[in-house]
Amino acid sequence: MEHPYLYVQAIFAMFGPGAEEWAFHHIHVLYSWVVMAMLLGLGFLSTRALALVPGKGQNVMEVLIDGLENFLVSIVGEEGRWLLPVSATIFLYIFLSNLVGLVPGFFPPTGNVNTPLSCALVVFFLTHAIGIKYHGIKYIKHFTGPSIFLAPLFLVIEIVGHLSRVLSLTFRLFGNISGKELVLGILFMLGGAFFAPLPMLVLGIFVSLVQAIVFFLLSSVYFAGSLEHAH
């Protein structure tokens, strides 16, 4: 299938073949910057005129952030409320990254395996940083099980289980988004002139939201697990 026309790559092509080639191989990074710029712009527009009686932009952001906070607290508990900035940022970044792929000329950063992997690694390392922060050296009990005699076996099982979380978060998100892009691309080629892809665009929005929620949910569950005391 022919590579789609991408605006950012076309801009880099103005600076020569070398720049275009670099943009082609790093297109997910470039569109990650685009998504981050969009998030910064939305944050600025919704908070530049904060008021007790919020306007439309502020009201939408307050409802969104409040919903994410309540969702997070319902899973992690009150002591995990401080994790909202990280969790909400991951959700918004993934959701918007998924959505931009529905716009012609844009590439979803989550359609490249490196982007979901980077988000999964953030969750992985933060999970264990939380465990060490709250439990200190006793956090090792999460990996050794209830009996010292079974500790070596439990340690191997827990290490494999925690590493599999990274693979699960990465390939679930990457597989769904890359699959969505492939199906949309085929439909546009076969019936773009007859609006055949429109139902798939609606489904694409739904998939984008669901995948962001799933990533947010699983991340919150992992954070909650690291906060719990080992039994």
Image (tube, rainbow, N blue to C red):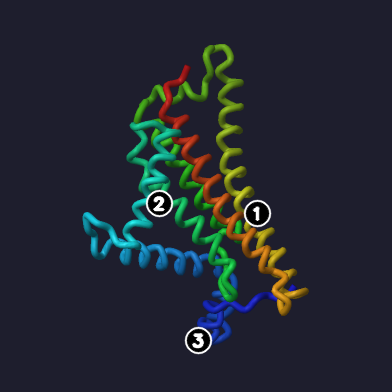
Q: Is residue 210 left or right of residue 47?
A: right
Query: Reading the chain from its start, which is encountered first: label 3 or label 1?
Result: 3
Residue drawn at 53 percent across, 80 percent down: 19
Residue drawn at 53 percent across, 51 percent down: 212
Query: Reading the chain from its start, which is encountered first: label 2 or label 1?
Result: 2
- Residue corresponding to mark 3: 15
- Residue corresponding to mark 2: 64
Query: Reading the chain from its start, which is encountered first: label 3 or label 2?
Result: 3
Query: Gap between marks 3 and 2, in whole Å?
Result: 40 Å
Which kind of residue does numbered mark 3 sit on?
Phe
Which kind of residue does numbered mark 2 sit on?
Leu
Nearer the viewer's eye, disc 3 or disc 2? Answer: 2
Q: Are marks 3 and 1 in contact (CB under 8 Å)?
A: no
* Residue 67 screen position, x and y as percent: 41, 45
Q: Is residue 176 left or right of residue 99?
A: right
Q: Residues within 10 Å of mark 1 (few under 14, many from 20)?
A: some
Q: Residues within 10 Å of mark 3 (few under 14, many from 20)?
A: few
Q: Is residue 47 above or below residue 22?
A: above
The secondary structure type at the circle numbered 1 is: helix
- Residue corresponding to mark 1: 176
The secondary structure type at the circle numbered 3 is: loop
Residue drawn at 55 percent across, 53 percent down: 209
